[in-house]
Amino acid sequence: MLWTVMPLEMVMEGSDSFAPTYTEISWQESTLVVEPLEMNTARVVRIISTNPEDYLNPQVQPGSIIQIRNNQPDLS
Amino acid sequence: MTSNHRRQRTPQTTRRPRTMPATAPDIPVKPEANHENALQNIEQLGQTTVPVQPEGNIHTISIIGQIEGHLTLPPQNKTTKYEHIIPQLVAIEQNPKIQGLLIILNTVGGDVEAGLAIAEMIDTLTKPTVSLVLGGGHSIGVPIAVSTDYSFITETATMTIHPIRLSGLVIGVPQTYEYLDKMQDRVIKFVTNHSRISSEKFRRLMFCTDQLARDIGTVMVGKDAIEDGLIDEVGGLGAAIAKLQSLIDGHYPSEVIH
């Protein structure tokens, strides 16, 4: 249920053509949901972890671009 | 196949020199990297980086755009996602280095459940919290703005209070109205419990008919929100940080150093 001052048609514009592809990769003891980009990079979409400190880790903040090697984040 | 193979190799070969210092201790590498970074900034943006600061004791969360709920919104929306904010609030509560939280709002509203979830989390955080409404804190932004220990609004910021509406297929039965009223009551109860505004006053503002051209409701600009008892004070960033610092000093009395 949306409660917003924006008209609903403006909020929902393009919702039928919005189809991003996400993959899950493991990182340390948790999982990252990433959107693969070109050249072994990916954009972090979400962190799935039970360690709250992971959510404050600047390296894997949602939106940050990370290097990926062998389906593992390469954060060196 | 071969082109694919090559494409994967290229970044590895270019990155090899960069990964080499990783075997050496981290610390000597850092100043050089910082220096390089600063040079790059001067070249590209004509500005230097902000000098390295001592680690602060406050964290800040900005609530921007639409508050996204159970439905992923199309990409032209700027959204605040509750699945990001909620674990961060858990980490903030649990991290001993963080002593206070500043919430900055510039939101047009969004999902009722997600907004109330964030507001409840901020409310039950044991550390001092201060909110600052910058451009706008509309609709579901209102409960989030009042959920903190102390709230600020800038002089030009606006807050819109209007009724919750149902979208999609609506069945014209009394139950529909009752359901909507129940949803509205959740929000009103939260807002009135966390600010000086009364339930009657909030409802009156919500159903006001002479303020908005396309809707019913009320727009409050800056100090209107203080007069109506929704927000505590008119102020900007400096005032918000100073208030947060004084709340922290009261909350952690043994650690105050003057």
Image: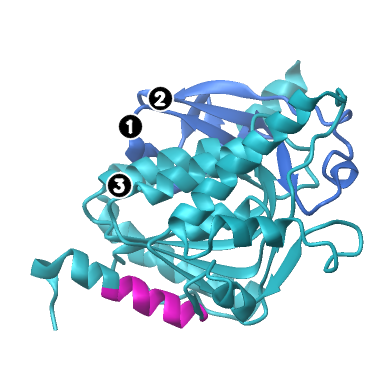
Secondary-structure class at tag 3? helix
**Magenta-colored stretch includes residue B237:** yes
Dot 3: chain letter: B
- Crowding near pointer 2: few (<14 within 10 Å), some, many (20+)? few
Percent coordinates x, y for residue B87 in the rendering: 42, 38
Residue A29 drawn above or below residue A46: above
Identified by mark 3, the residue type is Glu
Dot 2: chain letter: A
Q: Which chain is cyan?
A: B
Q: Which chain is blue?
A: A
Identified by mark 1, the residue type is Asn
The quarter of the image holding the N terminus of chain B is top right
Q: What distance separates the C-alpha of mark 1 from that of mark 2? A: 8 Å
Asked whether disc 1 touches disc 2, contact meaning CB atoms under 8 Å apart, the reply is yes
Which contiguous range is marked in magenta?
A: B235-246
Instruction: Name the residue that disc number 3 marks.
Output: B93
Dot 1: chain letter: A
**Residue B233 in sight here:** yes
**Magenta-colored stretch includes residue B104:** no
Q: Which mark is drawn over residue A30?
A: 2
**Left or right of residue B66: residue B234:** left
